[in-house]
Each structure stands twice: as C-alpha cells, then as structure tokens.
Amino acid sequence: MQVAEITRDETAQRAALLRVDSYDVELDLTGGAENFRSTSVIVFDCAQPGVATYADLIAERVREITLNGASLDPAAVYAQGRIALSGLASRNELRVVADCGYAGDGSGLMRTQDSADGRSYLSTQFEAAGARKVFACFEQPDLKAEFTFHVRVPGRVIVVSNQPASRPEPAGDGSAVWHFPATPRISTYLTAIAAGEYHLVTDSHTTPSGQVVPLGLACRRSLAEFLDADEIFAITRAGLDYFTGLFGMGYPFAKYDQVFVTDSPGAMENPGCVTITEQMLFRSKVTDTVRELRADLILHEMAHMWFGDLVTMTWWNDLWLNESFAEMCATQASAEATRFTDAWITFCGGRKAWGYGQDQLPSTHPIAADAPTLSVAESNFDGISYAKGAAVLKQLVAYLGRDNFFAGIRAYLAGHAWGNATLADLLRALEASSGKPLGDWSKAWLQTAGPNTLRSEFGSDDRGCFTDFAVLQEATAEHLVLRPHHIAIGLYNRVSNDADGSDALVRTHRVEVEVAGARTPVPDLAGLPQPDLLLLNDDDLGYAIVRFDERSLTTLTTSIGAFRDGLARTICWSAVMDMAAQAELSVPAFVKIVTAGMGHEPSVSLLQQLHRFTAQRMTTSADPAWATDGKRQLAAAGVNLLRSAEPGSDHQLAWAQLLGWSATSEDQLDLLAGLLDGSQQVAGLNVDTELRWTLLARLVAMGRAGQAQIEAELERDDTNTGRKHAAACRAAIPDADHKAQAWRLLTSPGELGIEETVEVGMAFNQVEHAALLAPYADAFFDQFPAVWAARDGLVRVVFGMVLFPFSAASPELLERADAFLAEHGQDAALCRAVIEGRDVAAKALRARKLPDAR
C-alpha cells in the first residue's frame, strides 16, 4: 500500500479543527507472528461541525470503522494510510478495528524471537510517525491526548507501558489483559508498549524534594546477567536529582522504566517507558568510553521528560529544540552529576565534531530547519539538529548567563506544560528572564546554515615576535554569513619534561576575543613571540572551524600527543580530522599524524573517537589502491601498542579493536588468528565474545577465514547478537556469491532492521573489496528508490548512508550521482543520501591529488 506523506500544512489545518480528548486502545498480541488485532476508540472535538478531515492508520486489513455510531465502509473511506472522516459533529467518537502487521523496519511494533530460549519480545518505536502502524490516530505532535491501553498477551508475558499497570486480568484461555490507566496529555509518538517474559529489576528513588519515583529495568531473560542494574540505577538517580533541581519542578510522570530492546535507533524518550538499544547491555568487556556513552544516553532521554514530553514541539521543524536541548543537558549532567567529569571534552571530540562534519555537507541546513513534510523532518535527525544545536545552546547559556538561561527554561516549561510550543515561545521566555533581545542572535545562529572558519593573520619581526595579529573569519560560498564569536586564543610552547626528557606542549599565554566580521584585530598579542602552536577557539568556547598557521601545523604533525591539556589536545585532533574530511589533508598524511600521535593519547575516549574516524576515512575517502598499505601502517603501530599496554587496561582493548579492522599483513593476521584460537596470548587481554567476533570479521574480510569458521563461532554464540554478527561476517566474505547474497539481504524489505542494516552494510562495503563491489555502484543508484519506497523511518536513511559506493569514487561516479539527482530531485529526502555521498566522493578525489597524498 502506498502511504500518503504527512505534511506540515495538512496537519496544521487538522490541528486548527480538532481537539483530541482521549484514546482507548486494545491490542491483542496473542495471535501469530505476522500481525495483531488493534481496536482504538478516539474521542475528539471539532471546531467546525460538518467539515471533513482524516485519521491515520497503516494496517494490513481494516475490519470496522464507526464514526459517531454510524458504520463506514473501509473500502470506501480507507486508502493510502488514511481514514476519510466527513460530516463531523462538535463531539465525536471514532472506533476502528484493524489487523496491523509487526514491523521489520524499526518503526511500529517490532517482534523479536530470542534464539537463545525461543521467547518472543515485542516493543514499539513510534518517532516520528509509527503509532499509526499500531492503532488509528491523529499522527502529529500537536494533537495531544490521554491514552489508555489494554494489552492482551499470553499468560506469562509482562507488559510495560507509559503508565503503571494494574494487576493483569486473566482472560480464561491462558492469556491475560494488562490494563493501564490514562496517561497525561502526550503526543502519539511518545506512547509505548513493550511485552515479553522480561527479566525485571525494580527499585525507587526519592528526589531531594521528597518525590518518590518508582524505577524499573527490563531486558530479555537471556541477557539478565549483563543487566548492570547498580550502575544504570546510579546514573538514573543522579539524573533525576540533577534535572528536578535544574528545571525547578518534579519528575512529571508516574514512573521511570527503562526497557532494553532489539533494533532501537539508540534510545527513545517514551515517558515512563524509555526504550534503549540492547547494545548498551555489555556482553563483553568495554572501555569506560562506552560506559560514558551509556550514561549520556540515559541522561539524554531523561532530559526529554521535561523538554520534549511535558512540553512538545508543535511540528517537526522544531525537532532540533528537543534534541539539541537534551544533548546539551545530558552532557552538562554527565559532567556535573556523574563520575564522567570530562563529558564536555568527550562532546568536543565526538558529537561536536560530528556536527562540524554534517554542517559542511551540501545538505546542511539551519538548526531551525524548514520541514514541510515528515520525510524531510526525518532526514534532519542529524549532527546539526543534535550536536551543532547543543554547541550553540551552550554558547547561549554563556551569553545570557547560566542562571538567566535556566530561569527562562523553567518559565517556559511551567507555561507550556502538557502542551506544545515553538522556538518563538522559548525565545520569549529567555528574553524575559535575561533582559536581552535574541532576534539577531536567532537569525545569525539558528536560521542560517553552514559553519564559519577562523584563521590567524599576523606579521613578525626578526626576533620572531608578532608585530600585528588578527583573526580572519570566513563563510562558505553557499552560506555567506559571518557571525559573532566569543573565543579564546591559546599560545602553546614546548617545555622540556625533566622527569623523562620528553617535551610537553604547555599554554604560555591566553587571551579572549570577540570576533566580529571578516577581520578582528587582536592587539593584545602584538610583541609576544610566535609560539610553537597557536590555537584559535582554545577552551572550546565557540562553534567554529579552526585552521592552523604553517608552524602550528608542523608542530601538530609531529607532537600532537605532547599536549598536557586534554581539551586543547581534543580541539586539535578535531581540527585535524576535519581537515582530512574536507580534503585539506590527504588520507595518507592524516594516517601519518594518527600513527605518530595515537600512542601518546592518554584519553581512551578520544583515542576511540580517533580510531572510528580513521576507519571511516579508510572506507569513504582512501584510494583503494593505497588503503591496504595505510591499514598495514596503522596495524603495525597497533601491534606494538597492544603488546606494551598495561594488561587488562582500556587502552589494551582499544588497540585490539583497532587491529580488528586494520590488520592486513600476514604476520598481523597471524596474530589475530592466534588470539582467536588461543595459540597466542597477550597478557591481560581477554578474548571474549565480542572481541572474538571482531577478530573473526577481519580474518574473513581478508580471506583468512570463511563460512566454516563463521558457523563454528555461531555455535559458540547462538544468540540474536551472534546471528547478527554472523550475517555481517558472511557479507564480508570476499567472493562474488557472498556479496550477491548480502546485497539481496540488504535490499529485501523487512529482512533487516536498523542495527543489522548498519552492521551488514558496513561488512559488505569494504574498501579492500573495491573490485568485487564495482557492479554494485550502478545497482545502488538503480535500486535505492525502490528500497526507499518499500521501507519507512530511519532504516531507509541508514541504507543510503552505508551503501553508497564510496570505493568506486571517480568522475564517472559523480556523473552517475548527478544523473540520479536530476531524475529524482523532487524527492528531497530520498536524494539527501546521494547528495552527501557524492560530496564525500568528490572530496576524496580532490584529496588524492594533494601533494601529501603519497
């Protein structure tokens, strides 16, 4: 069934007509594995009796539709995911009975069977418009209502929803019905159901104000041993205390359950029933970086309880408000309320760097992006809506003053509780609390696209001292906007370390500057000696791309690991990574810097971010003819660092994981094979379940292992996660038949969810297999529109991002992309992945022509 697009104009018209009072939803989940019965009753008012509108529903079969007691013929009124409603009264009741299908694309109600014990688990993911796949509704964020759920399940199944359940009612046939009281007024996309024979852990927490919040954790029974309840509850308690104080009001919902589910896009802020990817249950040793990521994820979703759930955007163009605010507040809470006190450094090197990269693609958009359709809005779940927005909000906190900023937030939340709001509403609240007008600030930072780049300009005398100094600000040709920036400039010099004879880069001078316009003089630096390294945006005060003078870049190339200040080192690594991404530094030159500096990096968080970025550059930008040599260089350094690392340390695990994608030479692959079969050991390194799959995947990709070894490993780990890893390993087998099988799997609707598409797609699309992948360059462009049409939500976006034929980068590929865009240009959401992939490929070709490319 072709489903009609959800548009801003139509939903605005519907919101002007309707006020939805309540939903009463019955779900019968006792049937087969393909579909379920859904019965929904919607009570709503209409401001203009007699007019027509529509309700949303995506169902396999619509059995009954009754409007105000009158039966409607589904064949006459149901089409393209809409139920036509005419002759509305001032007060209306709509009843719809339908058979809905379980979703295989990560949007709707998903059903997973646990291969470890055969139990089935169900969970919902409704953002942005998945509720209509489960029950008839008015699918838009500004038609809030109260929701009452009744869920029929087999007798031993536990059901979790937004509200606490009453005791399940036996249905007399071995099943039971779970009744949930009405929610407060929330949006359709925030409702949630999870059902299964869950392992449950419950507790409660009393906040400083005396509010008692029931807490719960749920996961599949086969994962119970990996549910780290103590650590997860500790983060949850810290977050509840922090946010109730920060926002000046209690937690607004009846409980705080967190359910770990399969194929989540990360996590979802369903009030009282937060869903989190099972990847956050660690089956094997992980570094503290990953634990910090989990803490940030928990706190991000919790911040949404107030900013997003209690007060919700009117339409998806303000998606950024939800996500940027939660991103900023989660980082702030991590830094101030948990043991992860360096969270802002982690943000600088990871999430903010993601924002910089996204902001320099042709698909960049203002933070407050225009979203005329839901598809366009879904494509904006990106580094701009999350990371750039968070960085800019952090600047706004500094500009207004923290007390003024959060006073405005508290007024905004209190004034719009249980309703909807817009950016204009937020700005009015902040202007009132601070006394500062924000119109110009909003235009400069929220309503324009693209980053600014800052460079230094200076003269020097024969003593090597600055005679003059200025900061130059540039804008991209497509977005000619110069903005105000408050930054610090740091001067760093080498200082000998008497203890071990090494040099350290230490800041010897710092000055703060208000950058405005194309050129900002900095007279305070005149007369000072030119340092070994000059760092613009020191302390990460602003949102701007920074570039280095020649002397500073030379220092970085050889001595980036000599920084003693973690934030300064992170800013420099971020800038070097950005230079590589923007084709200002070739991949070989970048790998040279990484190889020289990574062994001196004390932060495992930054080290792993660096490894992830380097792996990405190898896949998307490296010349396939050179990539093998480049990976060999990285792995050679990695082997030495693995053997010299402190046994059992996070660094040791990070080096092993590096080898899991870079090992290339026979001796490097021999080490991986030896670690896998036990014939070689590295003191302190536990080759556990996840590391085994990582090592095997590399051996498979390099032709040193195959189907037999994959099946043997799957026998050791015949779990849902193990099967996902095995599918990825099969996609990595370097022969034409297995590539063809993987392509069929990736392009078949409903076969793979979001997580599987990413893992299998990355295993398929490896730079070492460029020759094998050559036929799939045209196949991508030929089949992507059909894949897009057959799927929904984020899974189709992920397909386009992961499967773009980067290894085929050539002028001919750019021409093929241009032809695709010319043919499909009217579908902006479909074209976005191709626009971005084409840009990355074009930059890769430019970088290969740089003098340092060999």
Image (cartoon, rainbow, N blue to C red):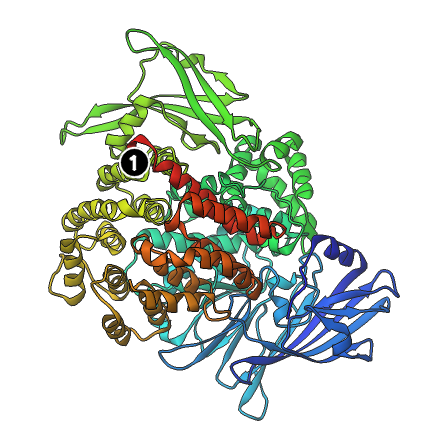
Q: Position of residue 843 (x, y in %)?
A: 42, 39
Observer able to see residue 245: no
Observer-nearest of 457 and 345: 457
| Quadrant of the rendering where the N terminus is positioned | bottom right
Which residue is located at x 31 percent, y 13 percent?
A: 529
Observer-nearest of 558 and 773: 773
Horizontal side of residue 281 vs 676, given as left or right = right
Which residue is located at x 21 percent, y 44 percent?
A: 633
- Residue positioned most to the left: 679
Q: Position of residue 733 (x, y in %)?
A: 29, 64
411 over 664 or under it: above or below: above
Horizontal side of residue 570 vs 300, given as left or right = left
Query: Circle 1 sits on which residue?
Result: 853
Q: Position of residue 206 (x, y in %)?
A: 50, 59
Q: Position of residue 188 (x, y in %)?
A: 64, 64
Element on which disc 1 rests: helix
Amino acid type, callout 1? Ala
Q: Is the residue marked by circle 1 packed among few (<14), some (14-19), or many (20+) residues within 10 Å? A: some
Quarter of the rendering containing residue 468: top left
Observer-nearest of 216 and 667: 667
| Quadrant of the rendering where the C terminus is positioned | top left
650 over 48 or under it: above or below: above
Horizontal side of residue 853 vs 97, given as left or right = left
- Residue positioned most to the bottom: 173
